[in-house]
Amino acid sequence: QVQLVESGGGLVQAGGSLRLSCVASGSIWYVNAMGWYRQAPGKQRELVADITRGGTTNYADSAKGRFTISRDNAKNTVYLQMNSLKPEDTAVYYCMSTITTATRVGQNYWGQGTQVTVSS
């Protein structure tokens, strides 16, 4: 069984910063891509940023220049540093990871989500 647990969300004023963390645990053989998605009320879930095991990153246009994704492969952990936050960044942020276990190859797993609220 695999679990992804996010932390670091909260309430912040516009222009502030937050750092999200997500740890993958369980019977993991291999962690490939890791990423962050978000879902605002009434909107579809969207990609914020993702990162390959080798460190290649990809960002949504809305995140470029403000957010930085990174990972620690030894700890099966992915981070999202969010700076210059805007009210439109308010959403539930979800961690996603592509993981291989003894019984499943390249399965996508999701965390439970962490709320980020940016006040104006």
Image: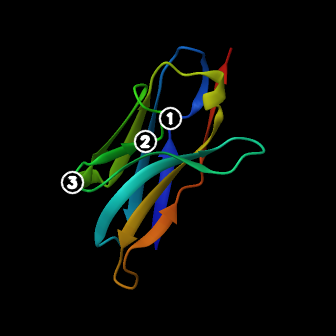
Label disc, if present, on residue 102 of the rendered structure: none
- What x and y, as percent, mark residue 102? 34, 83
Marks 1 and 3, how far apart in space? Answer: 24 Å
Around disc 3, counting alpha carbons within 10 Å, would you say few (fewer than 14), some (14 to 19), or many (20 or more)?
few
Marks 1 and 2, how far apart in space? Answer: 6 Å
Q: Amino acid at mark 2?
A: Ser
- What x and y, as percent, mark residue 29? 29, 73
Horizontal relation, residue 101 to residue 118: left or right: left
Q: Give the quarter of the image for residue 103.
A: bottom left
Residue lying at 49% horizontally and 65% vertically, measured from the top left: 109
Q: Earlier in the sequence, mark 2 or mark 3?
A: 2
Q: Which residue is mark 2?
A: 21
- Confirm or deny contact between disc 1 and disc 2 (CB under 8 A): yes
SS at mark 1?
loop
Above/below status of 32 relative to 102:
above
Residue lying at 43% horizontally and 41% vertically, measured from the top left: 21
SS at mark 2?
strand
Q: Amino acid at mark 1?
A: Gly
Q: Earlier in the sequence, mark 1 or mark 3?
A: 1
Q: Amino acid at mark 3?
A: Gly
